[in-house]
Amino acid sequence: MLFFAAATLVGAAGLLPRAARADDSPLKLVALGDSLTAGYRLPADAAFPAVLERALKAKGYKVEIANAGVSGDTSTGGLDRLDWSVPDGTQGVILELGANDMLRGTDPAVTRKALDTIIARLKERNIPVLLAGMLAAPNLGTEYRARFDAIYPDLAKIYGLVLYPFFLDGVAGQRANTMDDGLHPTAKGVERVVEGILPAVETFLGRLGQQKPEQKGQ
């Protein structure tokens, strides 16, 4: 009898609080990218995923953002490591890849195909994507820029994704926000990236079922 009662209580504890635990659990996101995500030459707590996570928590969101950035990675490299970089249980991906493709002058068709495949494979796994766009450098010529710059809005339209058009908005070309290489953001630059992308991330979280904290209970 005691065993039956205990088993009943365990069963109830396993079933009834599950929804509550799910509500209280942080949303698990993965930032999949290159050095701009990894935090090149920055301490771990100054990298984009960590700064974004703090900014969201400061607004009342419950999130955990894993840093799956690899310095030097191309879109094809991101595709090659997709399965182990985005583990089961991931509830959303911030996809930031393509900058190294552009810097190497990679055919935009190659970049487009790799990003398209990443998004399609994540969709098959029911993992939503926020797409962080990139723009080609002016010195690559008008034709290249037109083909490269179109990749991100095109894919966002095809898949119905939340798009942040230019990941380095407010950073690229701003000496105060870039390192001595003129490419990578400083800690201050990362903060500027987060400030810019935050509204898009909040929209993304809304799609994932997380209301704005001030709206809860209304």
Image (cartoon, rainbow, N blue to C red):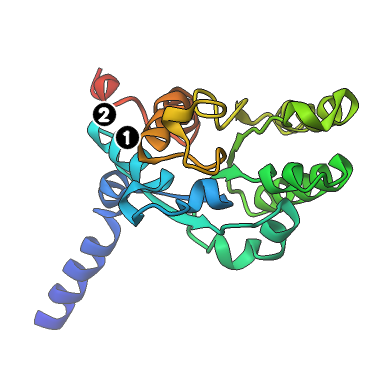
Q: Position of residue 162 (x, y in %)?
A: 59, 28
In the image, 12: left or right of 114?
left
Q: Is residue 17 above or below residue 190?
A: below
Q: Kindly check if marks 1 and 2 are in contact, taking CB atoms under 8 A apart as contact.
A: yes
Q: Which residue is mark 1?
A: 56
Q: Is residue 71 above or below residue 93?
A: below
Element carrying mark 2: loop
- The residue shown at (50%, 48%) is 37
* Place of residue 33 in the rendered image (x, y in percent of width and height, measured from the top left): 58, 50
Separation (CA) of disc 1 from disc 2: 5 Å
Does residue 1 appear in this view?
Answer: no
Q: Residue at x 83, y 47 (%)?
A: 106
Amino acid marked by disc 2: Lys
- Most extreme residue toward the front is 180
Residue 15 relative to residue 184: left or right: left
Q: Position of residue 107 (x, y in %)?
A: 88, 44
State the mark number for residue 129.
none
Q: Residue at x 64, y 61 (%)?
A: 82
- Work out which quarter of the rendered image holds the N terminus and state it: bottom left
Q: Nearer the viewer, residue 208 or 84?
A: 84
Mark 2: few/some/many CA within 10 Å (<14, 14-19, 20+) = few
Q: Is residue 77 left or right of residue 204?
A: right
Asked if one can make out residue 55 in the rendered structure from this viewpoint, the answer is: yes
Labelled disc at residue 59? 2
Q: Label 1, secondary structure: give it.
A: helix
